[in-house]
Amino acid sequence: MSRPLTVAAAQLGPIARDEPRSAVVKRMLALMQEAHEKDVDLIVFPELALTTFFPRWYFEDQADVDAFFETEMPGLETQALFDKAKELQIGFYLGYAELIKDPAGDRHFNTAILVDKTGEIIGKYRKIHLPGHEENETWRPFQHLERRYFETGDLGFGTYEGFGGTMGMCLCNDRRWPETFRVLGLKGAELVMIGYNTPLHYPPAPEHDHLQDFHNHLSMQAGAYQNGTWVVGVAKAGKEEGCDLIGKSCIIAPTGEIVAVAETLGDELITHVCDLDRCDEIRKNVFDFRRYREPENYTPITEAKEK
Ligand code: ING
């Protein structure tokens, strides 16, 4: 091991709609403590980890939507996570709903932050690929209103120096788009963290429901292999307010191999010692970007959206 980083995926089971943030934080602190006992350096929590996955409902009143957002980070209930990080010397990735109050118009983002072992925020990402729909679609058994409740992220796909390497972040649907991983790969990401809330049932194509776990791992394994990066995918899982969310949180090596996977649909910690130098096995060989990429042939990828 020349650059070992002990990483944990901290999967969360269902969060009830009326579950206070303090109760969720308590569950997360327990996972941090368990991680500490396993000498973990970095723990990754899911997307929107502080509340139930509220885009499954249509709300008339914006105040009801805003109640699921954080206006401060750290805030009253989340400060304990930062304090624990400093106490235990464990960094963390946290997904949450970010509200920026502004008299000119409030901003709403599906956000993730990276916090280092001193409890400092060293990276922030705002979700770019927003799935679902904008209006209440009553034919669906549940909504997926991320496109109504969040704005497209305005920070791009960033990388952050920390934990002895180059870290990358994205969120949920981003993992299905190869461009996400390629941009992070071109920026030198050696470990990409991804929180997700993925319903088992996909109303527009129910014939694919049995493929959700396959598509989840397919997307992340491909992203890892094709860019020579470690990937840590972390679910909010289980039957949450009547909606089944997939689990199978996992840690994936730059070769695309899954080296650890969650076995339950509840709160569960999986860990792996990730040697960041293993990225070179891929990036100095089969995916040596400088030697083998042909970007002059890729222009359609960055052209404007189809009409
Ligand atoms: N959830 C889902 C995801 O991309 C989805 C939405 C599910 C899209 C199944 C396509 C198929 O995993 C979020 N939060 O993006």
Image (spheres, rainbow, N blue to C red):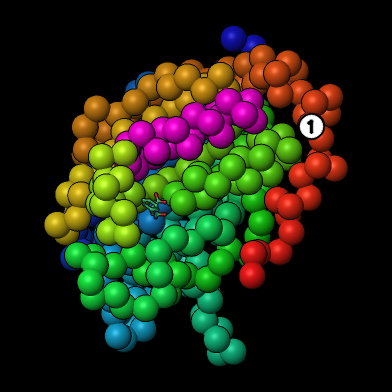
Q: Which residues are magenta?
A: 212-236
Report the residue marked by disc 1: 293
Residue 123 against residue 192 in the figure, above or below: below
Residue farthest along the top direction in this orientation: 1
Residue farthest along the left direction in this orientation: 242
Instruction: Please name whichever residue, 130 or 32, is drawn nearer the observer in this view of the structure.
Output: 130
Residue 45 against residue 49 in the figure, above or below: above
Residue 138 against residue 233 in the figure, above or below: below
In the figure, is residue 133 to the left or right of 179? Answer: left
The N terminus lies in which quarter of the figure?
top right
The number of callouts visible is: 1
- Give the percent coordinates (x, y) of residue 163: 60, 31
- Give the percent coordinates (x, y) of residue 233: 43, 37
- Give the percent coordinates (x, y) of residue 173: 46, 51
The C terminus lies in which quarter of the figure?
bottom right
Residue 109 against residue 40 in the figure, above or below: below
- Asked if the stretch drawn in magenta spans residue 121, the answer is no
Whether label 1 lies within 8 Å of ligand 1 gets the answer: no
Residue farthest along the bottom direction in this orientation: 103
In the figure, is residue 267 to the left or right of 295? Answer: left
In the image, what residue occupies the spot 30% across and 85% down? 60
Where disc 1 sits, the SS reads loop
In the image, what residue occupies the spot 21% across and 32% down? 264
Query: Which amino acid, by three-letter code, is at mark 1?
Result: Arg
- Asked if the stretch drawn in magenta spans residue 214, the answer is yes
- Give the percent coordinates (x, y) of residue 129: 53, 58
> Can residue 104 be seen?
yes
Residue 276 image-quadrant placement: top right
In the image, what residue occupies the spot 51% across and 39% down? 193
- The secondary structure that most of the magenta stretch takes on is helix
> Can residue 87 be seen?
no
In the image, what residue occupies the spot 60% across and 46% down? 180
